[in-house]
Image (cartoon, rainbow, N blue to C red):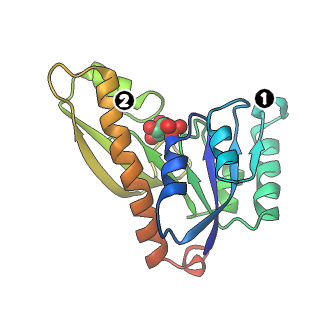
Amino acid sequence: KVRAAAFASGTGSNFQAIMEAEGLPIEVVLLVCDKPGAGVLEKAERFGVNASVFEPKSYESKSAYEQELIAELNGAGVEWIFLAGYMRIVGPDLLGAFEGRIINIHPSLLPAFPGKDAIGQAYQAGVDTTGVTVHFIDEGIDTGPIIAQEPVAVFPGDTEQQVKERIQQVEHRLYPQVIRQLLKETTYEDKTK
Ligand code: GAR
């Protein structure tokens, strides 16, 4: 199995979906969390996954923060990184260390509604279709090469909460599915060239 880290800042429902998915070719050996007290930490404990909690603000620079992350990831033998609600832009240090091996899930049909609160943005815009995107990370905000997308309908009269629930249901199915497919097709060696 491929040794993987999950990065999360929030409640961790996507982390949970990955942990509960059957037959994934990964072993999640580390959870990286940049928000002390985030709900995902309890989930990590429940699944017996080591958690590293960082406070990026306490570092003198983003680079210093990421260098410490990289040391931690290398120490745990991590090969792939899955961002699961990690609400921070990945900088050049981390990107360079894990080039082509950092994947993100985003709750919109990118390139529509990048950045924060994508569900709220789509709801406010009044679109009748939004969705979910899984993509490789690059130096932009939600701009990297798209691996998979799935549309999600917004029905007249929906509350934002209803849209969010519909999106999250898709996320929890799509993310494990993409991980399974991606790591079946791509060996570790292929991706580090
Ligand atoms: C998910 O909807 C994920 O797509 C989103 O944060 C949520 C985390 O929920 N990510 C982004 O917006 C990244 N730009 P969770 O903590 O319950 O998995």
Mark number displayed over residue 163: none
The amino acid type of the residue labelled 2 equals Ile
Q: Position of residue 146 (x, y in %)?
A: 38, 56
Q: Which residue corresponds to mark 2?
A: 119
Residue 110 appears in view: no
Q: 193 or 57: nearer the eye?
A: 57
Give the residue at the far left of this rendering.
156
Q: Position of residue 16 (x, y in %)?
A: 53, 48
Q: Residue at x 50, y 41 (%)?
A: 13
Mark number displayed over residue 57: 1
Residue 186 appears in view: yes
Which structural element holds mark 2? helix
Which structural element holds mark 1? helix
Question: Marks 1 and 2: which is nearer the front?
Answer: 2
Q: Residue at x 37, y 23 (%)?
A: 120
49 vs 191, left or right, is right
Q: Establish if 129 lies above or below 133.
A: above
Where's the N terminus, which quadrant? bottom right
Kindly tell me whether mark 2's CB lies below 8 Å from ligand 1: yes
Q: Position of residue 27 (x, y in %)?
A: 62, 66
Q: Establish if 122 lies above or below 67.
A: above
- Within 10 angstroms of label 2, few (less than 14), some, or many (20 or more) residues? many
Q: Residue at x 69, y 32 (%)?
A: 35
The amino acid type of the residue labelled 1 equals Lys
